[in-house]
Image: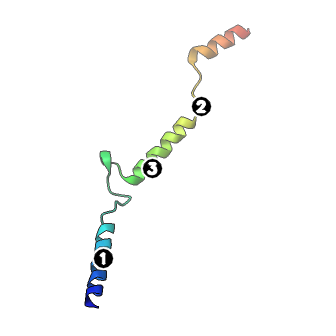
């Protein structure tokens, strides 16, 4: 019975120590960027990529002149 208790205790200790190794939202990752900062950068990039590209400067003037 003591062996079963010791084994359970060691298993619990192993699981607790393994969970302490997980990364939190505020710990810097690769490049020194935290997880929350990386998520914010990904969202900003998605917003920028979803925008329509601005019209070409020469294209608008040429279309306006041909319509006259």
Instruction: Label 2, secondary structure: give it.
Output: loop
Q: Earlier in the sequence, mark 2 or mark 3?
A: 3
Q: Residue at x 26, y 84 (%)?
A: 6
Q: Quadrant of the C terminus?
A: top right
**Viewer-proximal residue among 67 and 41:** 41
The CA distance from mark 2 to mark 3 is 23 Å
- Which of 21/14 is in front? 14
Residue receiving disc 3: 39
> Does residue 43 sit above or below 4 in this rendering?
above
Q: Quadrant of the N terminus?
A: bottom left
Q: Mark 2 or mark 1: which is in front?
A: 1
Q: Tell me whether the residue at label 2 lies in contact with that at label 1, contact meaning CB atoms closer than 8 angstroms.
A: no
Location of residue 32 in the rendering, given as x and y in whole percent from the top left corner? 30, 48
Q: Position of residue 53 (x, y in %)?
A: 57, 28
Judge from the rendering whether residue 21 lies leftward or rightward of residue 42; answer left or right: left
Going from N to C along the chain, the mark reached first, 3 or 1, is 1
Q: Give the mark toward the camera: 3 or 1.
A: 1
Marks 2 and 3 in Cβ contact (< 8 Å):
no
Residue annotated with mark 1: 11
Residue 30 position in % (x across, y down): 31, 47
Q: Which residue is mark 2?
A: 52
In this rendering, is residue 57 above or below 12?
Answer: above
| 60 relative to 32 in the view: left or right | right
Contact (Cβ within 8 Å) of mark 3 with mark 1: no
Count the marks: how many? 3
Q: Residue at the location (38% across, 58% down)?
A: 25
Other residues around mark 1 within 10 Å, as few (<14) / some (14–19) / many (≥20): few
Q: Quadrant of residue 13?
A: bottom left
């Amino acid at each position: 019975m003591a062996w079963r208790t010791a084994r359970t205790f060691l298993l619990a200790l192993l699981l607790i120590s393994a969970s302490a190794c997980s990364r939190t939202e505020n710990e810097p990752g690769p490049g020194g960027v935290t997880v929350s900062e990386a998520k914010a950068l990904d969202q900003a990039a998605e917003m920028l990529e979803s925008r329509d590209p601005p019209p070409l400067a020469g294209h608008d003037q040429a279309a306006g002149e041909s319509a006259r």
